[in-house]
Image: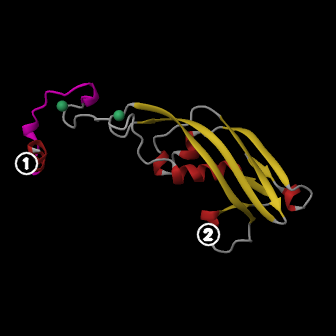
Amino acid sequence: MVLDITSVLSGEKSRLDIDYMLTLPREATAEHAVNLADVTFPTPARVTGQLTDNAGYMRLTLSVVLPYVTLCARCAKEVRGAFSIDFARTVVTEGMVEDAEEKEEDFAVSENGKLDIDRQLIEILSLEFPMRVLCKEDCKGLCDRCGKDLNEGACNCNKSEVHPAFAAILKKFEEK
Ligand SMILES: [Zn+2]
Ligand SMILES: [Zn+2]
């Protein structure tokens, strides 16, 4: 959603409420951040928040719980979860912030009286969504030889055929 904040910039209003359903198509997220490459957000999620103005100091707060689907980083099984975002950012108008780097990191920048709320949320996701999601904390993953899901039991692979370089390391573990 793009929020029209002209009424706040003109001083007519000091607060705008935000309440909408966010849909995040893959094109909006997957291509923009490596941590979101395998993540889809299949259902719309309700975003609530406010833009408040206190004598020219504008603050944006947003809150959303986003259901997601991704693949376990170890066994590639489908994992479903929900990612919560709760954040607040200072809002500035373009030109107010000179340093481009600062602009990206700390501020939500409005352009032509508009503030792109979806973009703020995608930015937060690209910064905070975990790089690796596991189906469970102790997921055993797949056998790197036969591909069997080791959560369902051991496979019959001959582990002694391991590459000699790894064999020595593995042997140490087995001795323990
Ligand atoms: Zn797993
Ligand atoms: Zn195996």
For the residues marked 1 and 2, what is the alpha-carbon distance in whole angstroms? 50 Å
Q: Is the residue 100 above or below the residue 5 in the image?
A: below
Left or right for 94, reference 85:
right
Residue occupying the point 9% across, 33% down = 158
Where the C terminus falls, by quadrant? top left
- Which span is picked out in magenta? 148-165
In-image side of 57 versus 123 (left or right):
right
Q: Is residue 151 magenta?
A: yes
- What residue is at 86 percent from the left and 56 percent from the top? 14
Q: Position of residue 141 (x, y in %)?
A: 29, 35
Q: Residue 116 vs residue 134: left or right?
A: right
The x, y position of residue 154, in whole percent, is: 19, 28
In the rendered image, the residue lying farthest to the top is: 152
Residue ID for mark 2: 102
Residue pushed farthest bottom? 98
Say what amino acid the circle numbered 2 marks: Glu
The verdict on residue 161 being magenta is: yes
Which residue position holds label 1? 164
N-terminal of the pair, mark 1 or mark 2, is: 2
Which percent across, then down, holds residue 159? 11, 36
**Image region (quadrant) for ligand 2:** top left
Secondary structure beneath dot 2 equals: helix
Quadrant where the image shows the N terminus: top right
Q: Residue 53, can we see it?
A: yes
